[in-house]
Structure formats: structure tokens, C-alpha cells
Amino acid sequence: MARRRKALPDEEDLRDLQFLYRQRQRMPPDPLKIDNLVANLMSKRGYGQLMGASELSDAWSEAVGAAAASRSRVGKVIRGVLQVYVQSSALMQELTFKKQKIVADLCRLLPDRKLRDVKFRVDAP
């Protein structure tokens, strides 16, 4: 049995392909989805970090109470460890005693953050 060879495209086929290619080059790009546009805008402008910091600060206030929250401030979350800056070593010791409860409350309030620990530091004025 003899194999059939594929026919090479003739000049007319090549012209059609070139025409289609040029048409495709002139077409506008596919429209973007609105959720992608919003996500890009939020990340470029930093709104996501602001909203995340506000959410974290609110959860901190609820976990430790208003008195301790007014004398401390939350920092960054690095590898699941929340950095918290406190005004005095006495407050740091008090919060260290309650650390397990605070971490449990923060995990309950912020399940998507995957917090596993809290590290306290005395903030120099």
C-alpha cells in the first residue's frame, strides 16, 4: 500500500491564511472580566492591604479588649506570626500570659489569615 502524502498549501490557501492573520492582528484584544479589573486595581492602589490592616486591627481589639488595644498596635503578619507593638513591658507580660487565648480568638475571628502565633515587642516612643 502506498501512503498518501499531504498536499502542500497552494498560493490561494497561503493568501487566505495571510489575510486571516492580518485581520486577527487588527482585532481588538479580548475584553477583560470585571473581577480581574477590580482585583488589579485593588492590588495596584494598595486597597487590599488597607482593608486587611483594618480588619486585623478590629480583630485585635476584640480579642484583647479596648484597654489593651488602646495601648498596643498590630504590625505585619509574617509566616503566620502577628507582630504586635505594646507601650510597656508590663503590658507585654500581661498579654504573654493570655497569648494562647488571644491566638485562639484571632484564629476564630480571622480564619483565612492562618495565624499560628503572636510576637510582642515594646515600642519605643
Image (spheres, rainbow, N blue to C red):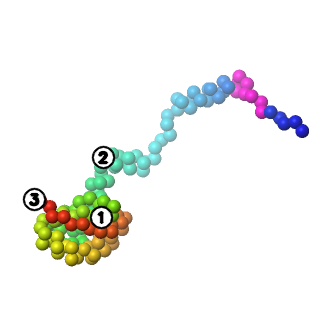
Q: Is residue 100 above or below residue 4?
A: below
Location of residue 5 (image quadrant): top right
The residue at the point 49 percent across, 34 percent down is: 28
Kind of element beneath mark 2 = helix
- What distance separates the C-alpha of mark 2 from that of mark 1? 25 Å
Which residue type carries mark 3?
Pro
Report whether 115 appears left or right of 36. Answer: left
Residue at 30% x, 64% y is 81
Would you say residue 21 is visible in this rendering? yes
Using the image, tell me which numbered label, if any, was put on residue 81. Answer: 1
Q: Are marks 3 and 2 in contact (CB under 8 Å)?
A: no
The circle drawn on residue 11 is none
Magenta span covers which residues? Answer: 6-13
Q: Residues within 10 Å of mark 2 (few under 14, many from 20)?
A: few
Category of crowding for the residue at label 3, using alpha-carbon neighbours closer than 10 angstroms: few (below 14), some (14–19), many (at least 20): few
Which residue is at a point 13% across and 69% down the rendered structure image? 89
